[in-house]
Amino acid sequence: EVGAGVTGYAVGDRVVSNGHHAEYVCVPKNLCARVPDGVSAKDAAFTVIAAIALQGIRLLKLTLGECVVVTGLGLIGLVAAQILKAQGCRVLGLDFDSEKIHLAREFGIEAVDLSGSEDPLAVAEQFSRGRGIDAVLITASTDSNEPVRQAATMCRKRGRIVLVGVVGTQISRADFYEKELSFQVSCSYGPGRYDEDYEEGGKDYPYAYVRWTEQRNFEAVLDLVASNAIDVQPLVSHCFGFAQAAEAYELIGGGKPLGILLEYGTQQASAEQQPVKHVSVPVQVDAAATVRVGFVGAGSYATSVLIPAFAGTDAALVSVSCNSGVSGTHVAKKFGIAGVTTDTGSLINSPDNNTIVITTRHNNHAELVRKGLEAGKHIFVEKPLAITRDQLADITSAYSRAAQGGNPQLMVGFNRRFAPHIKRAKTLLDASQQPASFIMTVNAGAIAANHWTQDPEVGGGRVIGEACHFVDLLRFLAASPIISTRAIQIGPGCIDGIRNDKVSIMLAFENGSTGVVHYLANGSKSFPKERLEIFCGGGILQLDNFRKMRGYGWPGFSKMNLWRQDKGNTQCVREFVELVQSGGQPLVPFAELVEVANSCFDVMEQLSP
């Protein structure tokens, strides 16, 4: 299939990618390339390996006729030697394996067997006609520093060395200083590698300024194969059917294979066949449990906080869905979840559960909540509820329809409402019956600009994705609707260039209370991460990191300390499970969930990009 917004590919195209070894893979558009007619599947399978070699060669910036040494004639080294020869370079290969030396010579490449008596430095001197080698490509794998030392010795003045393999890198300054040598480490397939915007986001680099990206390197390799400039089939030492893949991996660890091909079945999947796996885990689930939970997503927060919290209740943990069946099975076994699936739709619609816990990336929350409500399920969704007003409107409509036919419980994971300190503070505030002023300082810490939470289309940004916690907390403590939201952000010139995670949010409540949330990513880790200060009726409450709360001038209260931090996660889940069991009013009224979400949207609309 072809994903939404992807152009240049059609169903039926043969493509090559760096996808996983599996029957079904999902690959971003910048990480695949169309296979030309005349290039066999077996030849195309070498594309990614060859692109690694090609990127190292590009970094050498070679010209026609230069002499190049390739140190290490393994799979990448032998491909690199052929590409260099096709580029018009004179190539000398070095290796300790006589069979690989023989294969290199069959490709027309001069080679030195390091296991014999030949002196590679003397051969390189003669090969370069006494002028020194122009460039060395190191594709070896060893802990030794010898390949780099040897490369520096055989290079001419101002020669170039590029490391593609993994070798010792303790270099002699004298070797490099006297010749003004350059040394560079090559990064995988080429520009774009490890750049999430390029790889996952599909944002290509401008062709005029970045001629060779990892995808365009794939295409270049396929063109070389199509023109017979390089021959990869002699590099195949073994071939296994996919069912014997485990044997192939054992061979890599214990023998001296060169290139191992895994062959899949050639039968085309029909439209009815889906890349879905369901796995049962041998655990006992309470058949009489009134709360039967299915988890959508099994990331770090789910496995470290939410799933353990649900496991500590009377709820039956029925199933978990995630993209990787392997990681899902691991989570299921660890927490006693009965089933694992990669089909989220089947989990949501399954009659085996009545409650769905959603812990995916933020852009999926709204759709999953809507589907869960339409399936008649109770929903616990980790914040935020939605990342756009349109998504929030869809949820509102779905909730309204679901409420007409029952009493669906929809809970967003605003756990701080349930923290022991907050419950005590709320009791003190209710007794005072005076308007309060709240100052919430969040020392959030910096997150890289390319992290998914910073992406407006995936994470919604840090205000919508995380600061919503604190808007909700002040809404809870004020016990009054938000009537005004204003926001300001740091000015241009901040060191990381990100402004909308350094924000002050000012809230006005209907009962006269006011609140400020300082959500700041430009502070020190030595300062408390979360500090709440409450001014009310002549008294002050100060809470640091949900461990210590002090009262100043507050009648009947001076301090409340806990041995360990408690942000209310466990209590939040416990009360949600009890509510599903017994029925009743939601823990957080749906109108408040909408109110908090809209307040965060108001903030983002007031901030500059």
Image (cartoon, rainbow, N blue to C red):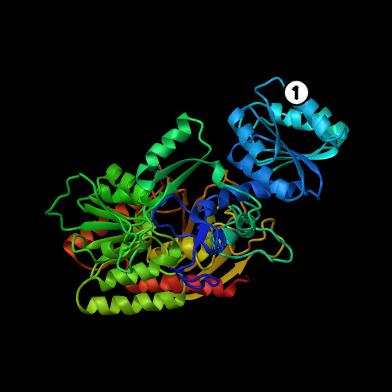
Query: Front-most of 180 and 453?
Result: 180
Badge 1 element: loop
- x and y percentages locating residue 53 in the rendered image: 64, 46
Disc 1: CA contacts within 10 A as few (<14), some (14-19) or many (>=20): few
Q: Quick check: 226 left or right of 508?
A: right
Say which residue appears at 42% left-offset and 49% top-offset. Answer: 263
Residue 103, relative to residue 368: is it above or below? Answer: above
Q: Is residue 141 above or below residue 219?
A: above
User: Residue 496: image x %, image y %?
Assistant: 66, 56
- Residue 393 visible, this orientation: yes
Q: Residue at 60% across / 48% down in the picture?
A: 231
Q: Which residue is mark 1?
A: 119
Q: Is residue 374 left or right of residue 327?
A: left
Q: Position of residue 75 (x, y in %)?
A: 58, 40
The image shows residue 576 at horizontal and vertical percentages of 26, 59
**Image quarter (top left, top right, bottom left or bottom right) of the N terminus:** bottom left
Check the image and report above or below for 341 versus 284.
below
Residue 171 vs residue 80, the one in the foreground: 80
Q: Residue at x 60, y 33 (%)?
A: 100
Q: Tell me if 439 is positioned left or right of 141 in this view.
A: left
Closer to the camera, 521 or 3? 3
**Tag 1: residue type?**
Asp
Image quarter where the C terminus lies is: bottom right
| Residue 440 seen by the camera | no
**Quarter assignment of residue 404:** bottom left
> What is the tally of numbered marks visible in this picture?
1
> Residue reaching furthest top?
117
